[in-house]
Image (cartoon, rainbow, N blue to C red):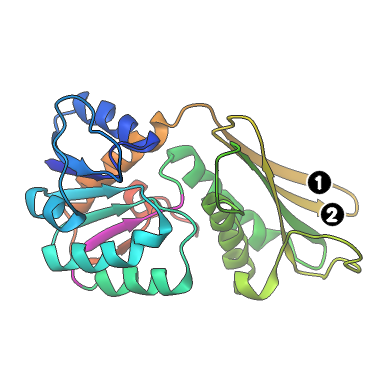
């Protein structure tokens, strides 16, 4: 398996280099924005050139690049593993369009543990009525993170919304400030904390009048994300065109 890494000089790119070197995969090289390549790593001028040389491209770059990358990957007819967060509705539409031509694994988080939490979140939401249990999602990340709520927090919200059979966009409450009034029944609340070098912490809380139920996940090392992305890459090569999640990769069901 020949793997290309978009954003190879970034934090996740460096971890992916380590994961590939410890596997049977072959590192083709990557793309970078203004940073020198690690020793012995080939830099390609753009993602189109990288895709042409690779069997699969793993992409942890910036949301502003997602739509262009979707077009280039579809044109190259290569599998695409996308872990970029903070995507807009138009970005996601571009990804969906590309998935008609190539297999894409798009996930907010590639950790096996996080995806198990997402499955549990949907099951819990289906069992705990929104009229009796308020859902709140609290996340904390390092001070350099530029988007909020995190992609994983939003994925948790979508899991809760799916369990309650509603659209997250219709019930999401984020960034409360000032005189907000009483909490709306059925709302899914978000709180984003930033500080230090926290890799990622997420807690889903169901708050009832007589009990609170919570489930949490804490990441201590991004190597778990790199390992999950590489696993997804091998999986995607065996699949037809389509838009997949890590739930598909890990064969996790929520029924």
> Residue shown at 82%/70% (left/top)?
184
Residue 91 percent coordinates (x, y) = 40, 69
Nearest the camera: 63 or 155?
63
* Numbered circle sitting on residue 96: none
Quadrant holding the N terminus: top left
Q: Residue 9, located in which quarter of the rendered image?
A: top left
Residue found at the very far left of the displayed protein: 53
Residue 75, percent across and down?
Answer: 14, 68
Of 176 and 127, nearer the camera is 176
Where residue 158 sits in the image (x, y, percent)?
A: 57, 62
Residue 106 inside the magenta-drawn segment:
yes
In the picture, measured across the screen, residue 24 lies left or right of residue 226, that is left
Is 60 drawn above or below residue 42 in the view shown?
below
* Residue 175 in the figure: left or right of residue 9: right
Looking at the rendered structure, the secondary structure element under dot 1 is strand
Considering every residue shown, the one lying at the far front of the view is 34
**Residue denoted by label 1:** 212
Q: Which residues are magenta?
A: 101-108
Q: Which residue is mark 2?
A: 208
Task: Give SS at disc 2.
Answer: strand
Density class for disc 1 (Cα within 10 Å; few <14, some 14-19, many ≥20) is few
Q: Image quarter for residue 183?
A: bottom right
Measuring from the top left, give residue 103's x and y in whole percent.
22, 61
Q: Residue at x 65, y 54 (%)?
A: 124
The image quarter containing residue 177 is bottom right
Asked whether disc 2 touches disc 1, contact meaning CB atoms under 8 Å apart, the reply is yes
- Confirm whether the magenta stretch covers residue 179: no
Give the distance between the C-alpha atoms of the residues marked 2 and 1, in whole angstroms.
6 Å
**Side of 221 relative to 66 (left or right):** right
Q: Residue at x 40, y 37 (%)?
A: 225
């Amino acid at each position: 398996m020949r793997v290309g890494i978009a954003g190879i000089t970034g934090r996740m790119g460096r971890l992916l280099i380590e994961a590939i070197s410890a596997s049977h995969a072959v590192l083709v090289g990557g793309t970078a924005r203004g940073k020198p390549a690690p020793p012995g790593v080939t830099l390609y001028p753009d993602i189109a050139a990288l895709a042409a040389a690779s069997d699969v491209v793993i992409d942890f770059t910036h949301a502003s690049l997602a739509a262009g990358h979707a077009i280039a990957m579809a044109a190259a007819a290569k599998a695409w593993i996308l872990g970029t967060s903070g995507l807009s509705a138009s970005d996601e539409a571009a990804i969906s369009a590309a998935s008609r031509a190539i297999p894409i694994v798009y996930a907010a988080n590639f950790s096996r543990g996080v995806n198990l939490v997402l499955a549990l979140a949907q099951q819990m939401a289906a069992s705990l009525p929104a009229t009796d249990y308020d859902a709140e999602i609290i996340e904390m990340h390092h001070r350099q993170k530029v988007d909020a709520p995190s992609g994983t927090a939003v994925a948790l919200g979508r899991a809760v919304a799916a369990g309650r059979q509603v659209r997250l966009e219709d019930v999401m409450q984020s960034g409360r400030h000032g005189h907000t009034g009483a909490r709306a029944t059925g709302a899914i609340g978000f709180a984003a904390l930033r500080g230090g070098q926290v890799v990622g912490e997420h807690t889903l809380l169901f708050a009832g009048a007589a009990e609170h139920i919570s489930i949490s996940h804490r990441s201590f090392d991004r190597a778990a994300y790199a390992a999950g992305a590489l696993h997804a890459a091998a999986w995607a090569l065996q699949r037809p065109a389509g838009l997949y999640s890590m739930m598909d990769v890990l064969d996790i069901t929520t029924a």
